[in-house]
Image: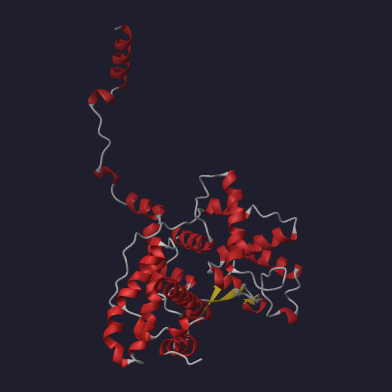
Amino acid sequence: MKSTDFSKHLSDYLTQYLPIECGVSPNTIKTYSITFAILLRYLKAEEGISPDKLSLKDITKVRIIAFLDWLQIERNCGISTRNARLATLHSFFKYIQYRDMKGMKVWQEILSIRFKKCASPEMAFLTTDAMKLLLMQPDISTRSGRRDLTLLGLLYDSAARVQELADLTPSDFRFEGYTTVRLKGKGNKSRIVPLSENQVKNLTRYMQEHHLFEPHANVYPLFSNPRNCKLSRAAILGIIKKYTARARLINPAAIPEGIGCHSFRHSKAMHMLEADINLVYIRDFLGHSSTTTTEVYARASAQKKMEALKKINPSIVTDRKTTWQKDGELLNWLKELQQKY
């Protein structure tokens, strides 16, 4: 079967340009691939264009906008998902600009499609007491409970992204002096994160129980499923949902809805901020490329806002009372008078 110009460019984009020229991670390429798979299904179902017949000339600004609207209306996707799909398409057509000059006008029309504005989602995080409550939920008398405690504790203690946690192997840890873990983040960037003493104790016991200190286990998944494959992001989320549900039964007010994998990362960052750790260090701990990203935690910290307000002279706004309110004897006399009449 003869390939179309679209299939050729898409294949080169996903297999050559992104991984080799840009150094994009496999997870990002997978996410981009999902966008194109959905687009192909849309074009076949709604436009009657089969994937094997699809050419670049078939993709226009009008069709892309219709696809984005379809995502929201038919697939019930939120604005953030719509924008993420559009970002993928923008990236592809920026690439196409240099490969197909004849269609430059069309590609630039697609690139002119604007992202929809949407309200920033509320950051879900746990207080220190709530995190302690959550980490008390795994039953450490069982093998699975001990694994779950180690997993949840490491997710919080290292502020790892869920994929960073899933990808860990025993070779990523260094136990000399103080214990550190190497996390491989976005864009294949690595960072070294120190771990707390209690987490190291849990981690050591877990690795000993699962024989992960053996030389042959050096590249095994740190957390694996019954098939000895690394846990998926969905499986890790399932573990989190299981224990947040238990903790919520004990203290519903402490465990808000919407707690997920990233909430552990948010919680660690907030707790570091509230401990007066400089944003620069928090940035490096989280693996952000700029403190601009990290500043979201400073904006979200209600405790820090209250501490800042307390530094303002409290006498500016006074507790104003009338003379008779200040005079306890007069007030009591008025109360007695009310009782008489």
Q: Can residue 157 be seen in this view?
A: yes
The image's colouring method is: secondary structure
Rendered-image quadrant of the C terminus: top left
Quadrant location of residue 226? bottom right
Residue 292 is at least partly visible in this image: no
| Residue 282 vertical placement versus 254 (above, below) | below
Q: Residue at x 45, y 80 (%)?
A: 50
Q: Residue at x 35, y 80 (%)?
A: 59
Callout count? 0
Which residue lies most toward the front here?
A: 48
Residue closer to the observer: 103 or 96? 103
Q: In this view, does 281 lie above or below 53?
A: above
- Position of residue 327 relative to residue 110, above or below, is above
Left or right of 170? Residue 314 is left
Residue under the point 48% across and 59% down = 271
207 sits to left or right of 247: right
Q: What percent of the width, then of the height, locates residue 281?
A: 45, 70
Side of 324 relative to 271 (left or right): left
Whether 25 is drawn above or below 223: the answer is: below
In this view, the residue farthest toward the top is: 340
Query: Residue 332 in the image: x percent, y percent?
Result: 32, 16
Out of 309 and 42, give the one closest to the viewer.
Answer: 42
Residue 184 is situated, as x and y percent measured from the top left of the image, at 54, 78
In-image side of 268 versus 294 (left or right): right
Q: Where on the picture, by quarter, is residue 53? A: bottom left
Q: Nearer the viewer, residue 192 or 7?
A: 7
Along the line of sight, which residue is nearer the eye, 237 or 84? 84
The percent position of residue 330, horizontal first and vertical second, equals 28, 18
